[in-house]
């Protein structure tokens, strides 16, 4: 009885107090977003069967690694980069070139050297290369902020795409690199789709753990302060350029890792996988899920992949229009989100 | 004589020698040479646009010097770097309150209590000692109950107090407060006065900008009057305020 009156009191208080009401509504939106997307994923899995779910799950895991890593830069540090796909591509091409065993010399088209490295030797090198290039690019990017930052990162995406397309002696340009082997340790090859899914999910788990350690450390707190007022952070004794460069480089290395997984999973890379649009979609996922929340990025990636794959099955939509239609839907979704929920599905911060 | 004794005997916390700053054609600070004594409260007054905030921005490295030298705690600097402020024992607040808006009140304080170097900061998690200090400061400025709120959701007076709290957390020797009393309710003014007086009792050097001459008379030990980016008068408060040129420039009579 008493509990009931207390409940009633708190309810009337809530109605009288718009802030409390807004807070309650907000937490409910988060709950509903979580339930909806996870329920959708489970339903999709039951409907389409395990085989398709494994494929979708792997695509999700790779997008999720990318979006969690980009959120470190965009959400936590406030640097709106649309060049993340460049590092994704660097990782993918490094793994593709180093592991490929195809005899391109016998083809009449572009021949490239083949190294035949094992996947687990090529992957760290791809990550490292993404990191080295990120340091070089980041030193320059540190001179810019806000709108100009978006533009220079845009430039990076364009340049990296053109390198993939035109450095034909290394990348085979538009022909792409075929027959990239799956990861193998000794005699055990990860050619089973389920095994590969488990592997990518494990990598995603490690990336999430790393990101969590980063953002909950003192370093992470400084990053959020940089997002809010970089000059004020500097006044309190922080070399903000070092902090920005460090998080940028770590994020780029994670993207490189995702690229390596992607190359090995699809067994084929060509420049079309690394166009600017992919970067834009990635930024959209981060904003959709919510800035500065690791879980949000996961949820955003899941919603995006479900949207992308789910629209294939719309009965009234011809197969050839699926690609464009999903962009239209995503675009409308983003506009609605910015209008009614600028902090994203489970986020707390605005752009 | 002990090594370093000379530095201790230096009667000035901050000196400037011929410093200048211009924004395009506007000369905000012109060949200004001032001395701020160690310990006690020094206030900087002057009409709007006289270069008070620019002076504080130059001393804290927020704006680069166009010329001249700044001497802080005996260190002679041609270039003042903002991130080196703590090594000079200097901290500040801003005229337009600059908090980390979309960050909790708690983290606004914690951010100045943690390690500055990149790699140690990556490995550092919050320690009980830091937690106690943050709690002490938040209780001191009366914002302990608001610790989980985002800074942007505080009232103006609370934001001002939080910014002062953040400066206190630095445990500096020199505090530069840019208009700490502007826009505050009378109770808040009393609170900020208390904080400044407590700092003075601890032997800190406090510099503040204010337009309120009653507060300036009441609190200051030393007074600097600026006009059009130049020094108009400097010295003991009552003596300076009785100078005819100060009365003329400041009160316009």
Image (tube, coloured by chain):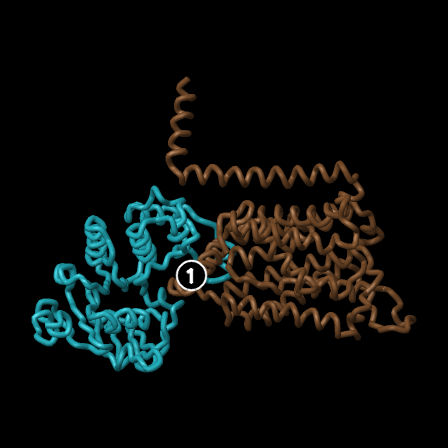
**What residue sits 9% from the left and 67% below the top?**
B238
**What residue sits 16% from the left and 67% below the top?**
B222
User: Is residue A237 rendered to the left or right of residue A115?
Assistant: left
Quadrant position of residue A262: bottom right
For disc 1, the neighbor class at 10 Å (few under 14, some 14 to 19, many from 20) is some
Residue A304 image offset from top left, x and y in percent: 66, 49
Q: Chain of mark 1?
A: A
Residue bearing mark 1: A229
Q: Is residue B130 visible?
A: no
Chain in brown colour? A
> Chain B rendered in what hue?
cyan
In this orientation, which residue lies closer to the viewer: A331 or B75? A331
Residue B125 image offset from top left, x and y in percent: 48, 50
Q: Residue placed farthest to the right in the image?
A: A106
**What residue sits 73% from the left and 40% below the top?**
A44
Quadrant position of residue A274: bottom right
Residue B37 image offset from top left, x and y in percent: 20, 69
Which quadrant holds the N terminus of chain A? top left
């Amino acid at each position: 009885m008493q509990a009931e009156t207390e409940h009633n009191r708190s309810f009337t208080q809530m109605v009288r107090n718009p802030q409390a009401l807004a807070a309650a509504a907000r937490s409910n939106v988060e709950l509903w977003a979580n339930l909806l997307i996870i329920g959708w994923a489970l339903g999709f899995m039951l409907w389409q069967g395990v085989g398709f779910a494994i494929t979708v799950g792997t695509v999700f895991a790779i997008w999720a690694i990318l979006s969690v890593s980009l959120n470190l830069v965009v959400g936590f540090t406030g640097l709106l980069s649309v060049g993340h796909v460049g590092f994704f591509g660097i990782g993918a091409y490094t793994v593709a070139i180093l592991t490929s065993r195809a005899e391109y010399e016998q083809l009449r088209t572009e021949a490239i050297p083949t190294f035949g490295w094992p996947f687990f030797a090529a992957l760290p090198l791809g990550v490292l290369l993404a990191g080295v290039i990120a340091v070089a690019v980041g030193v320059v990017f540190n001179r810019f902020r806000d709108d100009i930052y978006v533009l220079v990162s845009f430039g990076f995406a364009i340049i990296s795409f053109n390198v993939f397309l035109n450095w034909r002696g290394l990348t085979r340009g538009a022909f792409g690199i075929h027959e990239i082997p799956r990861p193998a340790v000794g005699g055990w090859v990860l050619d089973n789709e389920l095994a590969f899914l488990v592997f990518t999910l494990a990598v995603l788990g490690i990336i999430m753990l790393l990101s969590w350690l980063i953002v909950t450390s003192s370093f992470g707190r400084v990053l959020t302060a940089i997002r809010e007022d970089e000059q004020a952070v500097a006044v309190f004794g922080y070399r903000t350029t070092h902090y920005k460069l460090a998080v940028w480089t770590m994020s780029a290395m994670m993207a490189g890792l995702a690229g390596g997984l992607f190359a090995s999973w699809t067994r084929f890379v060509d420049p079309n996988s690394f166009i600017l649009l992919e970067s834009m979609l990635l930024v959209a996922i981060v904003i959709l899920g919510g800035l500065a929340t690791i879980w949000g990025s996961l949820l955003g990636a899941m919603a995006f992949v479900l949207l992308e794959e789910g629209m294939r099955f719309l009965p009234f939509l011809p197969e050839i229009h699926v690609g464009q239609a999903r962009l239209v839907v995503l675009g409308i979704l983003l506009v609605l989100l910015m209008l009614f929920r600028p902090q994203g599905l489970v986020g707390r911060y605005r752009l | 004589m002990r090594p370093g004794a000379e530095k201790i005997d230096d009667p000035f916390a901050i000196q400037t020698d011929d410093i200048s700053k211009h924004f395009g054609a506007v000369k905000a600070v012109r060949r200004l040479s001032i001395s701020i004594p160690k310990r006690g409260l020094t206030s900087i007054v002057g009409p709007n646009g006289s270069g008070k905030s620019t002076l504080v921005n130059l001393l804290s490295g927020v704006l680069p010097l166009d010329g001249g030298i700044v001497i802080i705690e005996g260190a002679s600097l041609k270039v003042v770097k903002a991130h080196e402020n703590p090594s000079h024992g200097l901290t500040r607040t801003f005229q337009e309150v600059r908090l980390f808006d979309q960050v909790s009140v708690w983290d606004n304080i914690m951010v100045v209590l943690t390690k500055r170097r990149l790699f140690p900061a990556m490995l550092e998690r919050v320690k009980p000692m830091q937690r106690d200090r943050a709690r002490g400061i938040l209780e001191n400025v009366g914002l302990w109950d608001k610790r989980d709120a985002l800074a942007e959701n505080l009232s103006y007076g609370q934001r001002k107090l939080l910014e002062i709290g953040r400066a206190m957390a630095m445990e500096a020797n020199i505090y530069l407060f840019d208009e700490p009393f502007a826009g505050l309710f009378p109770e808040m003014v009393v609170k900020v006065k208390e904080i400044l007086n407590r700092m003075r009792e601890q032997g800190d050097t406090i510099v503040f900008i204010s337009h309120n001459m009653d507060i300036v008379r009441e609190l200051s030990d030393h007074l600097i009057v600026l006009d059009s980016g130049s020094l108009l008068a400097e010295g003991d408060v009552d003596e300076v305020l009785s100078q005819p040129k100060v009365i003329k420039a400041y009160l316009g009579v």
